[in-house]
Image: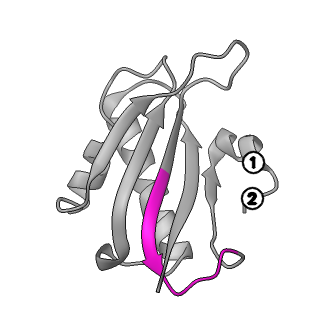
Amino acid sequence: MAVRAIRGATQLEVDDRDHLLASVDELIREILTQNQLGHEDLISMLFTATPDLHSEFPALAARQLGIGDVPLLCTQELDIAGAMPRVIRVMLHVETALTKAEVRHVYLRGAAALRRDLAQ
């Protein structure tokens, strides 16, 4: 097994707590599904949110999925002029047999424009 980092992001329509939690839930589930990962494969998750998001910690969505024994960290994304608004990014560190080339990074909604080379 190798340790791999898997990236993902989603763009919210509005800064609303329920919308944020549902969107992050969707993002985490999609990353796990596309990479055939289970809870036991997770090492840690790092979340960033753009400075315009204040309604909730993105990590709460992971906790609500039952990911309670995995270290989670939320930070604020850099406030860069012209950057895409209302974006939550995540980086999962996982143990997997997937090669780097096989890892599927997941970019949902408007966030797909962040990494057109990786978005599915």
Query: Is label 2 in a helix, a strand or a loop?
Result: loop
The residue at the point 55 percent across, 62 percent down is: 6
Q: Which residue was labeled with disc 2?
A: 118
The residue at the point 56 percent across, 22 percent down is: 78
Q: Is residue 95 magenta?
A: yes
Determine whether, in the image, residue 85 is placed left or right of residue 49: right
- Main SS type for the magenta part? strand
The residue at the point 57 percent across, 53 percent down is: 8
Which quadrant of the rendered structure holds the C terminus?
bottom right
Query: Is label 1 in a helix, a strand or a loop?
Result: helix
* Outermost front residue: 2
Residue 7 figure quarter = bottom right
Determine whether, in the image, residue 106 is placed left or right of residue 57: right
The type of residue carrying mark 2 is Leu
Identify the mark at residue 67; answer none if there is no mark. none
> Magenta span covers which residues?
91-100
Give the alpha-carbon distance from disc 1 to disc 2, as whole Å.
Answer: 5 Å
Above or below 57: residue 35: below
